[in-house]
Amino acid sequence: MDQMSNVTHKYLRPKKSFPNVWCPGCGIGIAMGAMIRAIDGLGLDKNQVAVVSGIGCTARIPVYLDFNTLHTTHGRPLAFATGVKLANPKMKVIVVSGDGDLLAIGGNHFIHAARRNMDITCILVNNYIYGMTGGQYSPTTPFKKLSSTGPYGMIEQSFDPAELARTAGATFVARGTVFHASQLSRLMSQAINRHGFSFVEVISNCHTQYGRLNREGSAVKMIQWQKDHAVPVSVAAKKTPEELEDKFITGVLYEQEKPGYVEEYQKIIDRFSRESTESMVRVTES
Amino acid sequence: MADIEQASEKKSWKKRTDPVVIYKKWCKACSICIEMCPKQVFDTDRDGFPVVTRGMDCTQCSICWIHCPEFAITSNEK
Ligand SMILES: Cc1ncc(C[n+]2csc(CCOP(=O)(O)OP(=O)(O)O)c2C)c(N)n1
Ligand code: SF4
Ligand code: SF4
Ligand code: SF4
C-alpha cells in the first residue's frame, strides 16, 4: 500500500471545508484516510469512483472528497448507490456510513443489497452509537453498555454487522480497525477491487458520546483498546470461544464468488438488444 | 541583529530538515500522533499541539500520518 504521507491531499476538497467537522481524535478521519490510500493504490480515475453516504458523522466523509459524491438521506445510501451503479455499471461505487445509518433506519436496504450481491463496496464505520445526534443507542451498541437513550444499559442484543452481511449474502466480508490503519487500507483495497457486494466493517472510536458515557477514556485510549481486543483471523482459529469472548476478529472473514445483480442484468439487456437487432434484420430482409 | 538573523536561519534550517511537518491550521491537538509515534519524535506544546523535537529519531514508519484524522501531517521525505 502506498504510504506516501500527503497522497490524501490529492483527493481532498481543501478549500471547501477544512478543518473537518469531527471531534478531535475521531477515528472517522483515520478510516477516511485509509479509504483514500486504498483508492489511490488501485490507481483508479477520480471520475470513475462514486462515494455515497447517508446521514451521520461518518456520512460526512464524501463532503470532503474530490470524487463523484452523494450525501443522501438517512439510511438510504445503498438505495442511491444501487441507482448509480445500474445507471453507470463502469463506476466504482463505494458506500460509507455509520452503524445507525446502515443498520437501523437503513437495515432493509443493507440486507437486500447484500442479498442481491449488488456490485458495491460497503464500508460501515462502527462506533457502537449514534454519534451525531447525541449518543442514542444503535443496533450495534453492546449488551449492558450505556447510551443516552439507554441510561440503565443496553437491554437489547446487538447485531454483528459482519455476520449480518455474510448471512444476508455478501460475497466479501472483512473487519478492520482504525488502530490497524494500514491493514484497513489493504482490506478496503481488496473490497473495492472485486465484484459483488463487498463489506468492510471498521471498528472506530466515538469518545465524545460512547466513550464518555461508558468511561472508556480519550480517543487515544479507545484506539489502544482496539489493539488489545482485535484478534487476526489466523490467530482466532487457534483460540477457544472463552478466549475470544470480549474480542473481535479482524481480517478477511469470508469470501465467495456468486453471480451478481449487475452482470445478470447486463445479460438480459444484451439478450434483448441482440434479439431486437435480429428481428430488425429479418424485417428488412423480408 | 546578526544574532536574530542567525537564529532565524537556524530555525528555517530546522524546519527544512524536520522529517515530518504538522499543518497547524488543520491540527486539532488530539495527541494521537504524539502517543502513537514509536520513537517519541513529538513533544506537546503548551496548547497541546505536537512539536517535532527529536526529528533525528524518526524512521519514516508512517504511523503518525496514517493515523492523523485531520490529514495534518506531511512527511518531508516521502
Ligand atoms: C429520517 C431521519 N431520522 C433521524 C435523523 C436523525 N439522525 C441523524 S444522524 C442519526 C444517526 C447517526 O448514527 P450513525 O449512523 O451510527 O452515525 P455516526 O454519527 O455514529 O457516525 C440520526 C438518528 C435524520 N437525520 N433523518
Ligand atoms: S460525535 Fe463521535 S463519531 Fe461524531 S465526530 Fe465526535 S467522536 Fe466522532
Ligand atoms: S514517521 Fe514514525 S517515527 Fe517518524 S514521527 Fe511519524 S510515527 Fe514517529
Ligand atoms: S494526530 Fe493530527 S490532529 Fe492529532 S495532534 Fe497529531 S497532527 Fe494534530
Image (cartoon, rainbow, N blue to C red):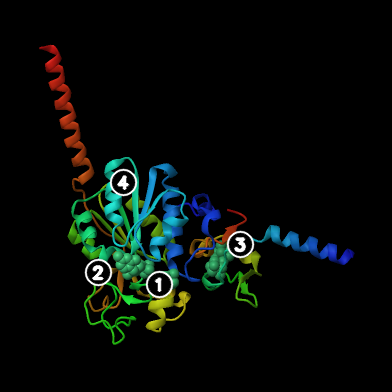
Name the amino acid type tagged 2: Asp
Q: Which residue is at the far bottom?
A: A152
Residue A134 coordinates in the image, percent (x, y): 38, 76
Label 3, label 2: how many angstroms apart (C-alpha)?
A: 38 Å
First along the sequence among labels 2 and 1: 2
What's the chain of the residue with tag 1? A
Residue A70 coordinates in the image, percent (x, y): 38, 52
Q: Which mark is residue B23?
A: 3
The quadrant of the rendered image in which ligand 1 is seen is bottom left
Asked if badge 3 and badge 4 are on a common chain, one would say no
Question: What residue lies at 49% left-to-right and 61% top-to-bottom?
Answer: B66
Question: What residue lies at 46% left-to-right and 53% top-to-bottom?
Answer: A65
Residue A166: which quarter of the image?
A: bottom left
Name the amino acid type tagged 1: Lys
Asked if badge 3 and badge 2 are on a common chain, one would say no
* Mark 3 Cβ inside 8 Å of ligand 4: yes
Q: Which mark is residue A84?
A: 4
Name the amino acid type tagged 4: Val
Q: Residues within 10 Å of mark 3 (few under 14, many from 20)?
A: few
First along the sequence among labels 1 and 4: 4
Q: Which residue is at the far top?
A: A286
Label 3, label 4: how many angstroms apart (C-alpha)?
A: 36 Å
First along the sequence among labels 4 and 2: 4
Residue A100 higher or lower than A79, as above or below: below
What's the chain of the residue with tag 3? B
Asked if badge 2 and badge 1 are on a common chain, one would say yes
